[in-house]
Image (cartoon, rainbow, N blue to C red):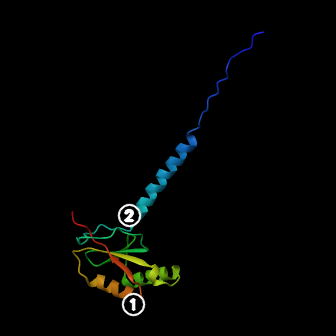
Amino acid sequence: MRLSKRRRTTSVHMNMTPMIDIVFLLIIFFMTVSQVSEVNREILDLPKQKGSLDQKPTTLTVNIDEAGEIIVAGTVYPMSDLIAMVADELVRLGDDPNKLTVVLRCDQRGTSKTVNQTVNALTRMQVKKVNIAVQVPD
């Protein structure tokens, strides 16, 4: 009697649809996150300065344009609202000014009046981590 020596061939198929779905979701996630981080940055002519640190994650980014307007996340605020915003941020961080990092992005064509007022207000609130953003020359 002759036995069949036929081999069963089994092929392994991988369903790629879930993997493609995950890749598209990751792409969408990173596109939206990168757009949100750019909202805090106004188009300003920053002062050119040698040697700078890479921008670390900040708690609050304050833009001061050429006219001396204070802009946070695309909205213009008066100084009193900025102080209230910083106070709210301090409460959120447990009233510890050492945990709050503020980055000032100031247009170099403007006067230093608003910048000085902002730094003085932050100093009165005991915020010690205030960084002034610059542009590294080529």
- For badge 1, the amino acid type reads Arg
Name the residue furthest bottom.
Answer: 124
Marks 1/2 in contact by CB < 8 Å: the verdict is: no
Using the rendered view, name the quadrant where residue 55 is placed: bottom left
Horizontal side, residue 66 vs residue 33: left or right: left
Position above or below: 7 against 126: above
Q: Which residue is mark 1?
A: 124
The residue pinned by badge 2 equals 38
Q: Residue farthest to the top?
A: 1
Instruction: Tell which tag, 1 or 2, sits nearer the viewer.
Output: 1
Residue 29, image x and y in percent? 48, 55
Q: Toward the viewer: 97 or 53?
A: 53
Q: Nearer the viewer, residue 63 or 6?
A: 6
**Residue 16 location, quadrant:** top right
Residue 41 picture location, percent across and down: 35, 67
Please name the residue shown 59% across and 36% down the image. Answer: 14
Question: On the rendered image, what quadrant is the C terminus found in?
Answer: bottom left
Could you tell me which residue is drawn at 37 percent across and 87 percent down?
Answer: 123
Q: Quadrant of residue 128?
A: bottom left
